[in-house]
Structure formats: C-alpha cells, structure tokens
Image (cartoon, grey):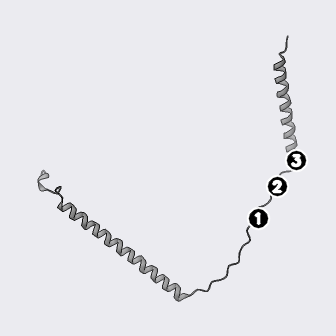
Amino acid sequence: MEIDPLSAGAAFLNWWEARKQRKLMESVAKSQPVRTRPKRRAPQRKRKAKRRDTAGTELLRQQRLRLEREKFEWSKNRDLWNGLKWFLEYSRSGEYDDEDYDD
C-alpha cells in the first residue's frame, strides 16, 4: 500500500492546525475573564433654580393663546373661501347641465 505524500502532508497540516486550536481554547478557558473598564459618566451640572416671573409667563401664555386663535380663524376663513371658489367654478362650468341626467 502506497501513501501519497501530498495527502500525508495535508493530513499533518490538518492535525497540526487542530492541535493549535485545541491549545488556544484550553488557554482561553483557563484564563481570567476580561473586564472592560466602566464608562466614565459626564459630571452632572447643578442647575440654578430659576425665579419665575408670573406676570411675564402669564403674558406669554395669553399671547400664545391669541396666536393659536388667529391661526385657527385664518385657516377657517381660508377653507370657507376655497369652498366658495370651488362652488363658483363648479356652477359656472358647462358640466352642470340638467340635460345630461336621464331621469
């Protein structure tokens, strides 16, 4: 029985690589677990207590409320004008004829 030198060399390299892998796994299993350094936290800033100006905040609240009401009124008027414009265009167009309906 004759052994091919190329096959023998491949078998030897395979055995050698498996041995290296086994030794590496044994050393990893015996070693201490790796500890990562804890992340540094940013120092917390102390915030100064703000003095509330009740008159100023009330004025801002009223102005914001007035602005919201104006926006609502504006959008309501815009919708009404768009509806009126559509109605006028629809009534003036030639599509609205009684002759087209078969009643």
Q: Helix, strand or loop at disc 3?
A: loop
Looking at the picture, does residue 98 appear above or below residue 50? above
**Which amino acid is tagged 2?**
Arg
Mark 3, residue position: 31
Query: Residue 80 at x, y = what percent?
Result: 29, 70
Mark 1, residue position: 40
Looking at the picture, does residue 3 appear above or below residue 19? above
Mark 2, residue position: 35
Q: Residue at x 81, y 20 (%)?
A: 7
Query: Residue 38 at x, y = what percent?
Result: 78, 61
Q: Earlier in the sequence, mark 1 or mark 2?
A: 2
Q: Nearer the viewer, residue 89 or 97?
A: 89
Query: In the rendered structure, are the residues bearing label 1 and label 2 in contact, judged by CB atoms less than 8 Å apart?
Result: no
Q: Helix, strand or loop at disc 1?
A: loop
Q: Residue at x 88, y 45 (%)?
A: 30
Query: For this view, does 30 lie left or right of residue 86?
Result: right
